Image (cartoon, helix red, strand yellow):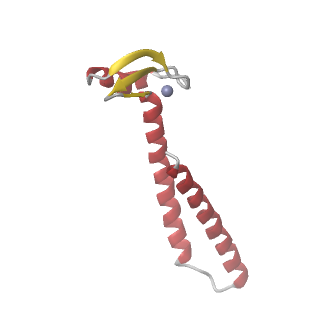
Amino acid sequence: MSVSDEEIRKIILPLMLSGAKMLDKHCPKCGSPLFEKDGRVFCPVCEHRRKEKLREMKGIEERLMEKLTELANSLPDDVDELEKHLRVMELIINLLERYKALEGGK
Ligand SMILES: [Zn+2]
């Protein structure tokens, strides 16, 4: 995905003003110029996108946790219903574990 005007305005411009050095190399992923700050070369756009994604995932994770708590607090007596209930809980737990694994890879 290439860099949008908004990303240039919100990410790249403030970075240039902050004194980071713009290199004449470009990010192979998004085409943004790479920057160097404190001896570290990085793509500001990809970094920003990664952070946004993590924030989004955190939101999903929180909602899943809420749902899980809600389900755990309202287990039905009927065995068939209980089985359905537990299956959904299992799915949520699997999803949460997958999110955790993804976040660990940041
Ligand atoms: Zn990039």
Relative to 49, is 27 above or below? Answer: above
Which residue lies at the image location 47% right of the left edge and 59% below the top edge? 62
| Nearest to the observer: residue 9 or residue 71 | 9
Where residue 16 appears, x then y in whole percent? 31, 20
Residue 69 at x, y percent in the picture? 50, 71
Residue 33, image quadrant: top left
Residue 105, compared with residue 87, is above or below; it is above
Residue at image point 46% right, 52% down: 58
**Where is residue 67 shown, x and y percent of the image?**
53, 66
Q: Nearer the viewer, residue 94 or 102?
A: 102
Residue extending farthest to the left is 18
**In this rendering, position of residue 89 left or right of residue 35:** right
The residue lying furthest to the top in this view is 24
Residue 106 or residue 30, whichever sits in front = 106
Asked if residue 89 is positioned above or below residue 77 in the image, the reply reads above
Locate the N terminus and report the quarter of the image it occupies: top right
Q: Identify which residue is drawn at 68% across, 70% down.
A: 87
Percent position of residue 56, x then y: 48, 47
Q: Residue furthest bottom?
A: 77
Lateral position of residue 103 relative to residue 78, left or right: left
Report the residue at 55% width, 22% height from top: 28
